[in-house]
Amino acid sequence: MNIAIVGAGIVGVTTAYELARDGHEVTVFDQRSAAAEEASFATAGLLAPLLLSPWALPGYGLPLRLLGAQATLRVAGGLNQRNLAWLWRWRAAGLAHSAPATALERLAQYSQARVQTIAQQHELDFEASEGRLVLLRTEAERTTLQPALQVLRDLGMAAHEIDAAAAQKLEPGLSPETALAGAIHLPGAGAGNCRLFAQLLRQGTQGSGVHFAFNTRIERIHSAPTGLQVHGEPDLRRFDAVVLCAGMASAALLPALGLRLPMTAVYGYSVSAPLREDTHAPRASVVDLGHQISITRLGQRVRIAGGAELAGADAAHHAPTLQRLYRTLNDWFPGGAQLSSGLQVWRGARTMLPDGAPVLGASGVPGLWLNTGHGAGGWALACGSARALADLIAQREPEVSLDGLGMRRF
Ligand SMILES: Cc1cc2nc3c(=O)[nH]c(=O)nc-3n(C[C@H](O)[C@H](O)[C@H](O)COP(=O)(O)OP(=O)(O)OC[C@H]3O[C@@H](n4cnc5c(N)ncnc54)[C@H](O)[C@@H]3O)c2cc1C
Protein backbone atom coordinates (compact mmCIF):
# COMPACT_ATOMS: atom_id res chain seq x y z
CA MET A 1 0.00 0.00 0.00
CA ASN A 2 0.91 3.63 -0.35
CA ILE A 3 0.75 4.96 3.22
CA ALA A 4 1.13 8.49 4.64
CA ILE A 5 2.26 9.19 8.20
CA VAL A 6 1.60 12.56 9.81
CA GLY A 7 4.41 13.33 12.26
CA ALA A 8 8.12 12.45 12.35
CA GLY A 9 8.51 12.20 16.12
CA ILE A 10 9.72 8.92 17.62
CA VAL A 11 6.29 7.37 17.04
CA GLY A 12 6.05 8.38 13.37
CA VAL A 13 9.64 7.37 12.52
CA THR A 14 9.31 3.92 14.12
CA THR A 15 5.92 3.41 12.43
CA ALA A 16 7.48 4.27 9.07
CA TYR A 17 10.26 1.76 9.72
CA GLU A 18 7.86 -1.09 10.49
CA LEU A 19 5.52 -0.33 7.59
CA ALA A 20 8.44 -0.21 5.15
CA ARG A 21 9.64 -3.56 6.50
CA ASP A 22 6.23 -4.96 5.56
CA GLY A 23 6.76 -3.77 2.00
CA HIS A 24 4.64 -0.60 1.99
CA GLU A 25 5.61 2.66 0.30
CA VAL A 26 5.63 5.26 3.08
CA THR A 27 5.72 9.06 3.11
CA VAL A 28 6.25 10.80 6.46
CA PHE A 29 5.12 14.42 6.65
CA ASP A 30 6.37 16.83 9.28
CA GLN A 31 6.00 20.57 9.63
CA ARG A 32 9.47 20.81 11.21
CA SER A 33 12.76 20.59 9.32
CA ALA A 34 14.01 17.36 10.96
CA ALA A 35 12.81 14.32 12.88
CA ALA A 36 12.13 14.43 16.64
CA GLU A 37 12.04 18.21 16.99
CA GLU A 38 9.01 18.37 19.31
CA ALA A 39 8.07 16.06 22.21
CA SER A 40 10.73 13.51 21.23
CA PHE A 41 13.58 16.04 21.38
CA ALA A 42 15.05 15.65 24.87
CA THR A 43 13.04 13.06 26.82
CA ALA A 44 14.38 11.59 30.03
CA GLY A 45 15.38 8.57 27.95
CA LEU A 46 13.59 5.96 30.06
CA LEU A 47 12.44 2.77 28.37
CA ALA A 48 10.63 -0.06 30.22
CA PRO A 49 9.40 -0.55 32.85
CA LEU A 50 6.92 2.21 32.30
CA LEU A 51 4.96 2.17 35.55
CA LEU A 52 7.74 3.45 37.79
CA SER A 53 8.54 6.40 35.50
CA PRO A 54 7.34 9.88 36.47
CA TRP A 55 3.78 10.62 35.35
CA ALA A 56 3.33 7.20 33.74
CA LEU A 57 -0.27 6.41 34.63
CA PRO A 58 -2.95 7.77 36.98
CA GLY A 59 -2.99 5.76 40.21
CA TYR A 60 0.58 4.45 39.83
CA GLY A 61 2.77 7.28 41.08
CA LEU A 62 2.27 10.19 43.39
CA PRO A 63 -1.36 11.30 43.81
CA LEU A 64 -2.51 14.33 41.85
CA ARG A 65 -2.07 17.46 44.02
CA LEU A 66 -2.51 20.95 42.64
CA LEU A 67 -1.84 23.11 45.66
CA GLY A 68 0.82 23.70 48.27
CA ALA A 69 4.47 22.76 48.57
CA GLN A 70 3.66 19.11 47.75
CA ALA A 71 1.88 19.97 44.47
CA THR A 72 2.55 17.34 41.80
CA LEU A 73 1.10 19.42 38.96
CA ARG A 74 1.58 23.15 38.48
CA VAL A 75 -1.32 25.00 36.91
CA ALA A 76 -0.33 28.28 35.28
CA GLY A 77 -2.45 30.77 33.37
CA GLY A 78 -5.78 29.42 34.62
CA LEU A 79 -7.66 26.27 33.84
CA ASN A 80 -9.64 26.05 30.62
CA GLN A 81 -12.59 23.72 30.17
CA ARG A 82 -10.58 21.06 28.34
CA ASN A 83 -7.88 20.93 31.04
CA LEU A 84 -10.49 20.79 33.77
CA ALA A 85 -12.31 17.88 32.12
CA TRP A 86 -8.99 16.08 31.62
CA LEU A 87 -7.97 16.65 35.25
CA TRP A 88 -11.27 15.33 36.47
CA ARG A 89 -10.96 12.15 34.40
CA TRP A 90 -7.27 11.62 35.28
CA ARG A 91 -8.12 11.88 38.98
CA ALA A 92 -11.07 9.51 38.62
CA ALA A 93 -8.93 6.98 36.72
CA GLY A 94 -6.33 7.21 39.50
CA LEU A 95 -8.85 6.61 42.27
CA ALA A 96 -10.48 3.71 40.42
CA HIS A 97 -7.14 2.23 39.24
CA SER A 98 -8.80 1.91 35.85
CA ALA A 99 -5.79 2.72 33.61
CA PRO A 100 -4.80 -0.27 31.42
CA ALA A 101 -1.61 -0.79 33.42
CA THR A 102 -0.92 -4.43 32.59
CA ALA A 103 -1.48 -3.95 28.85
CA LEU A 104 0.81 -0.91 28.83
CA GLU A 105 3.57 -2.54 30.82
CA ARG A 106 3.46 -5.53 28.47
CA LEU A 107 3.63 -3.18 25.50
CA ALA A 108 6.61 -1.39 27.09
CA GLN A 109 8.46 -4.70 27.54
CA TYR A 110 7.66 -5.73 23.98
CA SER A 111 8.79 -2.32 22.80
CA GLN A 112 12.10 -2.51 24.64
CA ALA A 113 12.84 -5.88 23.05
CA ARG A 114 12.03 -4.33 19.65
CA VAL A 115 14.35 -1.35 20.35
CA GLN A 116 17.17 -3.78 21.08
CA THR A 117 16.52 -5.89 17.98
CA ILE A 118 16.40 -2.84 15.69
CA ALA A 119 19.52 -1.34 17.28
CA GLN A 120 21.42 -4.60 16.83
CA GLN A 121 20.27 -5.19 13.27
CA HIS A 122 21.20 -1.69 12.12
CA GLU A 123 24.11 -1.11 14.53
CA LEU A 124 22.49 1.98 16.07
CA ASP A 125 24.50 3.46 18.91
CA PHE A 126 21.89 5.46 20.80
CA GLU A 127 23.70 5.95 24.14
CA ALA A 128 21.85 3.04 25.72
CA SER A 129 22.22 1.86 29.31
CA GLU A 130 20.75 -0.98 31.33
CA GLY A 131 19.44 -1.12 34.90
CA ARG A 132 17.60 1.47 37.01
CA LEU A 133 17.29 2.49 40.62
CA VAL A 134 14.09 4.01 41.92
CA LEU A 135 15.27 5.97 44.96
CA LEU A 136 13.02 6.20 48.02
CA ARG A 137 13.55 9.12 50.34
CA THR A 138 10.98 7.84 52.84
CA GLU A 139 9.22 4.59 53.73
CA ALA A 140 5.92 6.22 52.70
CA GLU A 141 7.19 6.30 49.11
CA ARG A 142 7.61 2.54 49.19
CA THR A 143 3.89 2.24 49.98
CA THR A 144 3.01 4.58 47.09
CA LEU A 145 4.61 2.36 44.51
CA GLN A 146 3.21 -0.99 45.66
CA PRO A 147 0.42 -1.06 43.00
CA ALA A 148 3.04 -0.58 40.26
CA LEU A 149 5.35 -3.21 41.77
CA GLN A 150 2.46 -5.64 41.91
CA VAL A 151 1.83 -5.23 38.16
CA LEU A 152 5.53 -5.76 37.40
CA ARG A 153 5.71 -8.86 39.57
CA ASP A 154 2.53 -10.32 38.09
CA LEU A 155 4.20 -9.96 34.70
CA GLY A 156 7.30 -11.74 35.98
CA MET A 157 9.61 -8.70 35.86
CA ALA A 158 12.49 -8.39 38.28
CA ALA A 159 12.04 -5.56 40.82
CA HIS A 160 14.20 -5.96 43.92
CA GLU A 161 13.65 -3.92 47.09
CA ILE A 162 17.14 -3.08 48.34
CA ASP A 163 18.66 -0.98 51.13
CA ALA A 164 20.78 2.15 50.81
CA ALA A 165 24.10 0.27 50.96
CA ALA A 166 23.12 -2.04 48.11
CA ALA A 167 21.94 0.96 46.08
CA GLN A 168 25.30 2.64 46.64
CA LYS A 169 27.09 -0.43 45.28
CA LEU A 170 25.04 -0.33 42.09
CA GLU A 171 25.46 3.42 41.66
CA PRO A 172 28.75 4.32 43.36
CA GLY A 173 28.31 8.01 42.50
CA LEU A 174 25.27 8.30 44.82
CA SER A 175 25.94 10.85 47.52
CA PRO A 176 26.02 9.38 51.04
CA GLU A 177 25.02 12.84 52.32
CA THR A 178 21.41 12.51 51.16
CA ALA A 179 19.17 10.32 53.28
CA LEU A 180 18.02 7.25 51.39
CA ALA A 181 15.37 4.94 52.89
CA GLY A 182 15.99 2.30 50.22
CA ALA A 183 15.54 1.70 46.51
CA ILE A 184 13.92 -0.53 43.95
CA HIS A 185 16.44 -2.09 41.64
CA LEU A 186 15.16 -2.84 38.13
CA PRO A 187 17.98 -4.80 36.49
CA GLY A 188 16.13 -5.19 33.18
CA ALA A 189 15.24 -1.50 32.79
CA GLY A 190 16.51 0.29 29.72
CA ALA A 191 17.34 3.87 28.78
CA GLY A 192 18.76 5.65 25.78
CA ASN A 193 18.67 8.77 23.67
CA CYS A 194 15.23 8.94 22.01
CA ARG A 195 16.07 11.70 19.52
CA LEU A 196 19.32 10.05 18.48
CA PHE A 197 17.50 6.75 17.91
CA ALA A 198 14.84 8.52 15.80
CA GLN A 199 17.46 10.32 13.73
CA LEU A 200 19.58 7.22 13.15
CA LEU A 201 16.49 5.23 12.18
CA ARG A 202 15.34 8.02 9.87
CA GLN A 203 18.71 8.01 8.11
CA GLY A 204 18.51 4.24 7.82
CA THR A 205 14.98 4.14 6.40
CA GLN A 206 15.28 7.09 4.00
CA GLY A 207 15.25 5.64 0.51
CA SER A 208 14.35 2.10 1.54
CA GLY A 209 10.62 2.48 1.03
CA VAL A 210 10.32 5.64 3.17
CA HIS A 211 10.31 9.21 1.97
CA PHE A 212 10.43 12.07 4.48
CA ALA A 213 8.70 15.33 3.57
CA PHE A 214 9.91 17.94 6.06
CA ASN A 215 8.75 21.55 6.32
CA THR A 216 5.39 20.23 5.13
CA ARG A 217 2.36 21.04 7.21
CA ILE A 218 -0.77 18.92 6.95
CA GLU A 219 -3.89 21.08 7.10
CA ARG A 220 -6.46 18.34 7.00
CA ILE A 221 -6.94 14.60 6.74
CA HIS A 222 -9.59 13.36 4.31
CA SER A 223 -11.51 10.14 4.04
CA ALA A 224 -13.38 8.88 0.93
CA PRO A 225 -11.05 9.39 -0.79
CA THR A 226 -8.32 8.88 1.80
CA GLY A 227 -5.70 11.61 1.57
CA LEU A 228 -4.01 14.67 2.99
CA GLN A 229 -4.36 18.36 2.35
CA VAL A 230 -0.88 19.84 2.45
CA HIS A 231 -0.54 23.52 3.37
CA GLY A 232 -0.19 25.63 0.21
CA GLU A 233 -1.25 22.89 -2.21
CA PRO A 234 -4.61 23.09 -4.01
CA ASP A 235 -5.01 19.35 -4.61
CA LEU A 236 -5.51 16.49 -2.23
CA ARG A 237 -2.61 14.01 -1.99
CA ARG A 238 -4.20 10.59 -2.15
CA PHE A 239 -3.02 7.54 -0.19
CA ASP A 240 -4.36 4.06 0.55
CA ALA A 241 -4.06 4.73 4.28
CA VAL A 242 -3.02 7.50 6.68
CA VAL A 243 -1.46 6.97 10.12
CA LEU A 244 -1.79 9.85 12.56
CA CYS A 245 1.33 10.24 14.77
CA ALA A 246 1.17 14.02 15.23
CA GLY A 247 1.60 14.20 19.00
CA MET A 248 -0.34 17.06 20.55
CA ALA A 249 -1.55 18.23 17.13
CA SER A 250 -3.42 14.95 16.62
CA ALA A 251 -6.38 16.23 18.64
CA ALA A 252 -6.73 19.25 16.33
CA LEU A 253 -6.67 17.18 13.12
CA LEU A 254 -9.43 14.78 14.15
CA PRO A 255 -12.60 16.88 14.62
CA ALA A 256 -12.88 17.52 10.85
CA LEU A 257 -13.46 13.75 10.56
CA GLY A 258 -16.00 13.69 13.37
CA LEU A 259 -13.54 12.22 15.91
CA ARG A 260 -12.42 13.64 19.23
CA LEU A 261 -9.59 12.77 21.61
CA PRO A 262 -9.57 14.32 25.12
CA MET A 263 -5.83 15.13 25.05
CA THR A 264 -3.98 17.61 27.19
CA ALA A 265 -0.37 18.74 27.11
CA VAL A 266 1.38 18.25 30.45
CA TYR A 267 4.64 20.14 30.03
CA GLY A 268 7.89 19.07 31.60
CA TYR A 269 11.57 19.99 31.47
CA SER A 270 14.91 18.37 30.92
CA VAL A 271 18.42 19.68 31.45
CA SER A 272 21.30 17.93 29.70
CA ALA A 273 24.75 18.63 31.09
CA PRO A 274 28.22 17.46 30.09
CA LEU A 275 29.75 14.83 32.33
CA ARG A 276 32.14 16.29 34.88
CA GLU A 277 33.48 13.45 36.99
CA ASP A 278 32.67 9.99 35.66
CA THR A 279 32.78 8.31 39.06
CA HIS A 280 30.34 10.88 40.53
CA ALA A 281 27.78 10.49 37.75
CA PRO A 282 25.06 7.87 37.35
CA ARG A 283 26.04 4.73 35.45
CA ALA A 284 22.53 4.21 34.07
CA SER A 285 19.12 5.71 35.00
CA VAL A 286 17.81 6.74 38.40
CA VAL A 287 14.34 7.94 39.41
CA ASP A 288 13.73 10.06 42.51
CA LEU A 289 10.19 8.88 43.17
CA GLY A 290 9.18 11.57 45.66
CA HIS A 291 10.33 14.41 43.41
CA GLN A 292 9.19 12.70 40.18
CA ILE A 293 12.57 13.49 38.66
CA SER A 294 14.82 11.18 36.67
CA ILE A 295 18.57 11.35 36.17
CA THR A 296 19.90 9.45 33.16
CA ARG A 297 23.36 8.85 31.84
CA LEU A 298 23.36 9.44 28.08
CA GLY A 299 26.85 8.88 26.70
CA GLN A 300 29.04 11.76 27.83
CA ARG A 301 26.09 13.69 29.28
CA VAL A 302 23.75 13.49 32.23
CA ARG A 303 20.08 14.37 31.69
CA ILE A 304 17.81 15.45 34.55
CA ALA A 305 14.09 15.53 33.72
CA GLY A 306 10.90 16.35 35.59
CA GLY A 307 8.22 18.91 36.32
CA ALA A 308 4.60 18.81 35.28
CA GLU A 309 2.60 21.86 34.35
CA LEU A 310 -0.59 22.81 32.61
CA ALA A 311 0.40 26.03 30.86
CA GLY A 312 0.50 27.35 27.32
CA ALA A 313 2.85 25.98 24.67
CA ASP A 314 4.74 29.28 24.67
CA ALA A 315 4.85 29.82 28.45
CA ALA A 316 8.19 30.99 29.82
CA HIS A 317 10.40 28.45 31.56
CA HIS A 318 9.44 28.12 35.22
CA ALA A 319 12.63 28.90 37.11
CA PRO A 320 11.65 27.18 40.42
CA THR A 321 11.00 23.90 38.55
CA LEU A 322 14.40 24.10 36.86
CA GLN A 323 16.04 24.85 40.20
CA ARG A 324 14.38 21.74 41.61
CA LEU A 325 16.01 19.70 38.83
CA TYR A 326 19.45 21.13 39.64
CA ARG A 327 18.92 20.58 43.38
CA THR A 328 17.87 16.97 42.86
CA LEU A 329 20.96 16.28 40.75
CA ASN A 330 23.06 17.87 43.44
CA ASP A 331 21.35 15.80 46.16
CA TRP A 332 22.19 12.50 44.47
CA PHE A 333 25.18 13.05 42.20
CA PRO A 334 27.05 16.19 43.32
CA GLY A 335 29.94 16.85 40.97
CA GLY A 336 28.70 14.36 38.40
CA ALA A 337 27.75 16.94 35.78
CA GLN A 338 29.07 20.28 34.71
CA LEU A 339 26.36 22.87 35.30
CA SER A 340 28.30 26.04 34.52
CA SER A 341 28.39 25.72 30.73
CA GLY A 342 27.27 23.60 27.79
CA LEU A 343 23.77 23.05 29.19
CA GLN A 344 20.75 22.21 27.04
CA VAL A 345 17.52 23.25 28.74
CA TRP A 346 14.33 21.96 27.14
CA ARG A 347 10.60 22.22 27.78
CA GLY A 348 8.36 19.69 26.06
CA ALA A 349 4.81 18.37 26.09
CA ARG A 350 3.60 15.02 27.29
CA THR A 351 0.51 14.43 25.16
CA MET A 352 -1.75 12.88 27.74
CA LEU A 353 -5.08 11.13 27.45
CA PRO A 354 -6.98 10.90 30.75
CA ASP A 355 -5.93 7.29 31.46
CA GLY A 356 -2.30 7.89 30.45
CA ALA A 357 -2.49 5.31 27.64
CA PRO A 358 -2.10 5.95 23.89
CA VAL A 359 -4.69 5.37 21.19
CA LEU A 360 -3.53 2.60 18.96
CA GLY A 361 -5.35 1.02 16.01
CA ALA A 362 -8.21 1.72 13.64
CA SER A 363 -9.89 5.09 14.05
CA GLY A 364 -13.33 4.04 12.85
CA VAL A 365 -12.89 6.28 9.78
CA PRO A 366 -11.96 4.09 6.78
CA GLY A 367 -8.27 4.43 5.86
CA LEU A 368 -7.27 6.32 9.02
CA TRP A 369 -5.15 4.65 11.71
CA LEU A 370 -4.11 6.14 15.03
CA ASN A 371 -0.80 5.86 16.90
CA THR A 372 -0.79 8.81 19.22
CA GLY A 373 -1.27 10.14 22.77
CA HIS A 374 1.65 8.27 24.34
CA GLY A 375 1.83 10.68 27.28
CA ALA A 376 4.89 10.17 29.46
CA GLY A 377 5.88 6.98 27.66
CA GLY A 378 6.22 7.70 23.95
CA TRP A 379 9.84 6.57 23.76
CA ALA A 380 9.19 3.53 25.94
CA LEU A 381 6.21 2.48 23.82
CA ALA A 382 7.11 3.65 20.29
CA CYS A 383 8.79 0.59 18.77
CA GLY A 384 6.19 -1.82 20.13
CA SER A 385 3.27 0.42 19.14
CA ALA A 386 4.72 0.75 15.64
CA ARG A 387 5.14 -3.01 15.18
CA ALA A 388 1.65 -3.72 16.52
CA LEU A 389 0.07 -1.08 14.29
CA ALA A 390 1.86 -2.43 11.21
CA ASP A 391 0.47 -5.88 12.08
CA LEU A 392 -3.07 -4.48 12.36
CA ILE A 393 -2.72 -2.77 8.97
CA ALA A 394 -1.54 -6.10 7.53
CA GLN A 395 -4.61 -7.74 9.15
CA ARG A 396 -2.32 -9.83 11.35
CA GLU A 397 -2.84 -10.42 15.06
CA PRO A 398 -0.20 -8.31 16.89
CA GLU A 399 2.23 -10.28 19.09
CA VAL A 400 1.20 -8.12 22.04
CA SER A 401 -2.30 -7.48 23.36
CA LEU A 402 -3.70 -4.02 22.70
CA ASP A 403 -6.69 -4.45 25.02
CA GLY A 404 -7.85 -1.12 26.41
CA LEU A 405 -5.74 0.95 24.01
CA GLY A 406 -8.25 1.51 21.22
CA MET A 407 -10.32 4.52 20.17
CA ARG A 408 -13.54 2.91 21.40
CA ARG A 409 -12.78 3.82 25.02
CA PHE A 410 -13.51 7.50 24.25
C1 LIG B 1 10.22 16.24 30.25
C2 LIG B 1 9.78 15.02 29.50
C3 LIG B 1 10.41 13.82 29.72
C4 LIG B 1 9.99 12.66 29.06
N1 LIG B 1 10.64 11.50 29.30
C5 LIG B 1 10.24 10.36 28.70
C6 LIG B 1 10.90 9.14 28.94
O1 LIG B 1 11.86 9.07 29.69
N2 LIG B 1 10.45 8.03 28.32
C7 LIG B 1 9.38 8.06 27.47
O2 LIG B 1 8.99 7.02 26.98
N3 LIG B 1 8.74 9.21 27.21
C8 LIG B 1 9.14 10.36 27.80
N4 LIG B 1 8.48 11.53 27.56
C9 LIG B 1 7.31 11.50 26.65
C10 LIG B 1 7.78 11.53 25.20
O3 LIG B 1 8.53 12.69 25.02
C11 LIG B 1 6.58 11.53 24.25
O4 LIG B 1 5.62 10.58 24.63
C12 LIG B 1 7.01 11.21 22.82
O5 LIG B 1 8.10 11.98 22.44
C13 LIG B 1 5.85 11.42 21.86
O6 LIG B 1 6.31 11.17 20.57
P1 LIG B 1 5.40 11.48 19.31
O7 LIG B 1 6.13 11.03 18.11
O8 LIG B 1 4.02 10.98 19.56
O9 LIG B 1 5.23 13.07 19.31
P2 LIG B 1 6.22 14.20 18.77
O10 LIG B 1 7.62 13.86 19.02
O11 LIG B 1 5.70 15.49 19.29
O12 LIG B 1 6.01 14.14 17.21
C14 LIG B 1 4.87 14.66 16.57
C15 LIG B 1 5.33 15.29 15.27
O13 LIG B 1 4.20 15.66 14.50
C16 LIG B 1 4.51 16.84 13.81
N5 LIG B 1 3.26 17.49 13.44
C17 LIG B 1 2.28 17.90 14.28
N6 LIG B 1 1.27 18.45 13.56
C18 LIG B 1 1.61 18.37 12.26
C19 LIG B 1 0.99 18.79 11.06
N7 LIG B 1 -0.23 19.37 11.05
N8 LIG B 1 1.64 18.59 9.90
C20 LIG B 1 2.87 18.00 9.87
N9 LIG B 1 3.51 17.59 10.99
C21 LIG B 1 2.89 17.77 12.16
C22 LIG B 1 5.34 17.63 14.80
O14 LIG B 1 6.14 18.58 14.15
C23 LIG B 1 6.15 16.54 15.47
O15 LIG B 1 7.41 16.36 14.87
C24 LIG B 1 8.90 12.71 28.16
C25 LIG B 1 8.27 13.94 27.92
C26 LIG B 1 8.70 15.07 28.58
C27 LIG B 1 8.01 16.38 28.31
Image: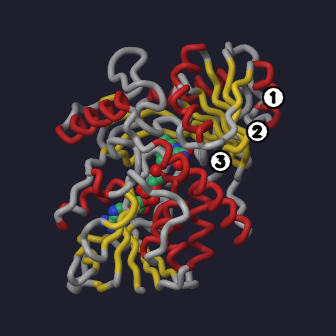
In the picture provided, is 155 more to the left or to the right than 182?
left
SS of the residue at dot 3?
strand
Cα separation between marks 3 and 2: 11 Å
Look at 23% across and 84% down and name the residue there.
225
Q: List x then y, in percent, for residue 3.
A: 40, 80
Mark number, residue 172: 1
In the depicted structure, whether residue 6 falls above or below residue 108? below
SS of the residue at dot 2?
loop
- Mark 3, ligand 1, within 8 Å: the answer is yes
Q: Which quadrant of the structure image shows residue 354?
A: top left
Q: Quadrant of the N terminus?
A: bottom left
In the picture provided, is 349 more to the left or to the right than 169?
left
Cα separation between marks 2 and 1: 8 Å
SS of the residue at dot 1?
loop
Mark number, residue 61: none
Q: How is the image coloured?
A: secondary structure
Q: Are marks 2 and 1 in contact (CB under 8 Å)?
A: yes
- Assess disc 1: are there few (<14), some (14-19) or many (≥20) residues with their C-alpha within 10 Å of its C-alpha: some
In the depicted structure, whether residue 1 falls above or below residue 11? below
